[in-house]
């Protein structure tokens, strides 16, 4: 990767660190779709983080189709999306248990994750006890029997 590409990637990652992508959130059916999305996102955030962090914007991404489009939430800080991702299991057993929360990744990160997943599939033929774990925010293939160390936690 060239120096300028590296700088652009770093800037893009910083900008996207303020975002969170929500999948499987049904499309609103009322007259004010944006307000319904904002209300639903506020409820989801309140379920995960009761002191409800404020967010800058909520909008659907992608073209309208028969499947619900993902919702992008922009926060004012990059701690809130991280907290939401770490505590997304709090949605289990609620009306939002089917909603999936993901990082907003750059194209480079998406391509790298795709390569790691392909590598995992190849290696799983020989060793079934493998999975992808994020170590220092980088997807890495690890053995599921591996004992966690201070570095991996």
Image (cartoon, rainbow, N blue to C red):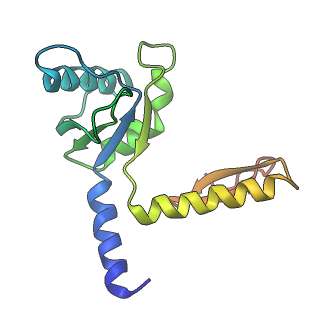
Q: Which residue occupies the foreground of this view, 111 or 93?
A: 111
Task: Judge whether 93 appears above or below 50 on screen.
Answer: above
Task: Judge whether 122 appears above or below 10 on screen.
Answer: above
Q: Residue furthest bottom?
A: 3
Q: Residue at x 37, y 79 (%)?
A: 6
Give residue 130's position: percent from left, percent from top: 77, 51
Q: Residue at x 31, y 27 (%)?
A: 45
Side (left or right) of 119 relative to 16: right
Q: Which residue occupies the foreground of this view, 114 or 100?
A: 114
Residue 60: name its quadrant.
top left
Residue 102: name its quadrant.
top left
Give residue 114's position: percent from left, percent from top: 57, 58
Side (left or right) of 86 relative to 27: right
Side (left or right) of 57 relative to 125: left
Q: Residue at x 34, y 36 (%)?
A: 70
* Residue 151 seen in this snapshot: no
Q: Residue at x 53, y 64 (%)?
A: 112
Q: Residue furthest right?
A: 126
Give residue 113's position: percent from left, percent from top: 55, 58
* Residue 147 seen in this snapshot: yes
Give residue 17's position: percent from left, percent from top: 32, 54
Q: Which residue occupies the foreground of this view, 21 or 107?
A: 107
């Amino acid at each position: 990767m060239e120096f300028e590409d590296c700088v652009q990637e770093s800037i893009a990652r910083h900008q996207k660190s303020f975002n969170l992508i929500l999948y499987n959130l049904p499309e609103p059916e009322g007259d004010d779709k944006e307000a319904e999305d904002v209300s639903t996102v506020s409820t989801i955030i309140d379920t995960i983080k009761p002191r409800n962090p404020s967010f800058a914007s909520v909008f659907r991404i992608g073209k309208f189709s028969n499947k619900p489009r993902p919702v992008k939430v922009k926060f004012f800080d990059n701690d809130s999306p991280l907290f939401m991702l770490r505590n997304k299991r709090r949605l289990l057993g609620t009306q939002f248990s089917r909603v999936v929360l993901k990082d907003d990744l750059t194209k480079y990160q998406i391509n790298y994750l795709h390569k790691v997943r392909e590598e995992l599939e190849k290696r799983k033929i020989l060793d079934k006890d493998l999975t992808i774990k994020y170590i220092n925010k980088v997807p890495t293939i690890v053995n599921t029997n591996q004992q966690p160390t201070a570095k991996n936690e």
